[in-house]
Amino acid sequence: MGTKTIRDSYLPYGRQWIDEEDIQSVVNILKGDYLTTGPAVAEFEQAVASYVGAMYAVAFSNGTAALHGACFAAGIGEGDEVITTPMTFAASSNCVLYQGGKPVFADIDPKTYNIDPKNVEALINENTKAIIPVHFTGQPVDIDELHQLAKKHNLVVIEDAAHAMGATYKGDKIGSLSDMTMFSFHPVKHITSGEGGIITTNNEEYYQKLLQFRSHGITREPNKLVENHGPWYYEMQFLGFNYRITDIQAALGTSQLKKLDKFVDLRKKYVSLYNKAFKEIDGIQTPYQDQNGESSWHLYIIRLDLDKLSVSRKAVFEALVNENIGVNVHYIPVHLLPYYTKLGYQRGICPIAEKLYEEIITLPLFPAMIEEDIMDVIAAVNKVFNNYRK
Ligand SMILES: *Cc1c(COP(=O)(O)O)cnc(C)c1O
């Protein structure tokens, strides 16, 4: 291989885009009266609810805490089974474990890489209480089919939409459709609040439970109190957590939300450049897109046809890193993580996801990239494939 790398500086696979307006919004909070539990939190919640078209939103310290809250609100407890996908970040199923429930992994669709409703149905039994589908890479799952199953079997649907802010399903924004939907505001996601997450819902009961869960299980609302000793009085009515988001984070989130549509458009533009370039390369499968939804493109994942290459996925990965291209692998199937195998989950329960894991590489994709960055990635992929083609 040549000695000169395609790039001089390392290009990460994802990162935030913070502008002066974002910085000013945080500075205003720092100069104000409330760093936490102030008005910026409700403002952020209202802005997100209105963007996705949901009635309520409850912001959390991070997306994982938000998923925990959703499982609590859904009443998940000891012995309850919750069906989710293995092709996700561990948080999608850890939230079930936090509540003493049992995650059950349904294999994915080989084309979309999303949870396959057929496999979900096969796993439903009398202990099944909920489904946590993940819009993997930002491509919406088949929501109508999952809702039909949920209705038939009386299940709660909690969408893990950490990848899917700004995505639509049959014309509706993700976040308005299921019992509850979670978004994450980690810096690699569509918009950021540093750390942060949110649940959107149209259900008032879930909304009230989420608010109380986020703050120790404590309420001060007169109509919820069992007793009332006076103006100082509050009740802790169940064991909640301190999962609050700060006003600093919320203000950043509100400012970022104004740019979401622009961010998604840039992601789509870069994806079309990738798709066009990689269609020509023998040995690369570009992402399939289902016509029922429009992805908001959190991740761009190529699948390698290893029969066409003289080396392993690991060697391709390392060669791209050597070109200063920040590649990644999303994800190691959750049931193969050591904590899960110790719980008894075995290789072989989700063969499609397990095989996919062996063949994928995530390429850099974030709105603050410039077109030159995209061309560097394309050049690096071409260089590596030309070296390693059989
Ligand atoms: C990022 C992410 C989460 C968790 O979000 P945090 O805000 O990092 O806690 C959950 N699920 C998926 C699929 C994610 O990508």
Image: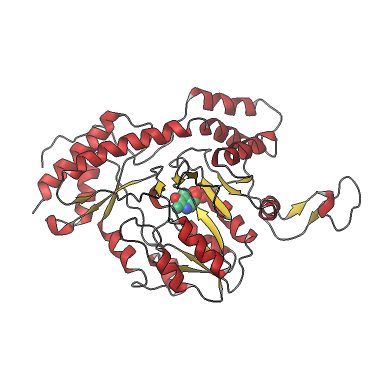
Residue 45 relative to residue 116: left or right = right
Horizontally, is 301 left or right of 264 in the view?
Answer: left
Quarter of the figure with the N terminus? top left
Q: Give the quarter of the image for residue 110.
A: bottom left
Please report the residue visible at 28 percent of the width from the left and 38 percent of the height from the top: 272
Q: Position of residue 25 (x, y in %)?
A: 58, 27
Please tell me which residue lies in front, 27 or 73: 73
Answer left or right for 195 relative to 267: right
Q: Is residue 343 above or below residue 33?
A: below
Residue 45, x across and y down, in percent? 62, 40
359 sits to left or right of 136:
left
* Residue 30 rendering spot, x and y as whole percentages: 63, 28
**Residue 382 seen in the figure:** yes
Residue at 56%, 76% (x, y): give it. Answer: 126
- Report if residue 130 is visible in the image: no
Q: How many marks?
A: 0
Quadrant of the snapshot with the C terminus: bottom left
Q: Is residue 271 above or below residue 343?
A: above
x and y percentages locating residue 116 in the rendered image: 39, 63
Q: How is the image coloured?
A: secondary structure
Q: Residue furthest right?
A: 229
